[in-house]
Image: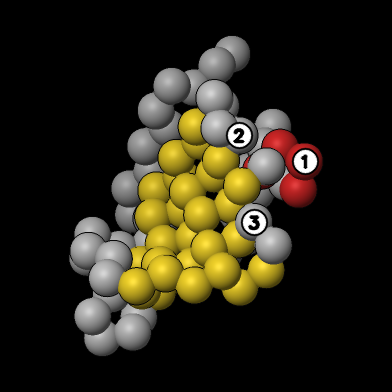
Amino acid sequence: MKFHYYPEADSLYIDLSNKTSVDSREVAPGVVVDFDEQGKIVGIDIDHASMIIDLSRLETNSLPLADLHIAGARA
């Protein structure tokens, strides 16, 4: 899973799979879910993310993380 934030658009994309999206549906205002050809969710796009989500904090609870990469981390 990867989180991509695009500050110029204030958009957060949560990439759940390496599969290609073939369909998208807006499930709430500004929230679009992408699906693969089997109908499985491959990504979630959140517009105006900083107005909806606290982007300064990411908390996980009991995730079985074998590998954690933090790209572009700020001190």
Q: Nearer the viewer, residue 35 or 16?
A: 35
Q: Earlier along the polypeptide chain: callout 2 or callout 1?
A: 2
Q: Can you give x and y, in whole percent of width and height, for residue 40 in the image?
A: 35, 80
Asked if one can make out residue 63 in the rendered structure from this viewpoint, the answer is no
Amino acid tagged 1: Met
* Residues tagged 2 and 1 counted as in contact (Cβ below 8 A): yes
Q: Quadrant of residue 26?
A: bottom right
Question: Disc 2 to disc 1, how far (Cα)?
Answer: 9 Å
Badge 2 density bin: few <14, some 14–19, many ≥20, Cα 10 Å = few
Q: Nearer the viewer, residue 28 or 72?
A: 28
* Residues tagged 1 and 3 counted as in contact (Cβ below 8 A): no
Which residue is disc 2 drawn over?
10
Which residue is disc 1 drawn over?
51
Which is closer to the viewer, label 1 or label 3? 3
Which residue is disc 3 drawn over?
30
Question: Disc 2 to disc 3, how far (Cα)?
Answer: 11 Å
Amino acid tagged 3: Gly
Q: Can you give x and y, in whole percent of width and height, for residue 9 in the image?
A: 55, 32
- Quadrant where the C terminus lies? top right
Q: Earlier along the polypeptide chain: callout 2 or callout 3?
A: 2
- Quadrant where the N terminus lies? bottom left
Tell whether 24 sits left or right of 20: right
Residue at coordinates 55% horizontally, 16% vertically from top-left?
74
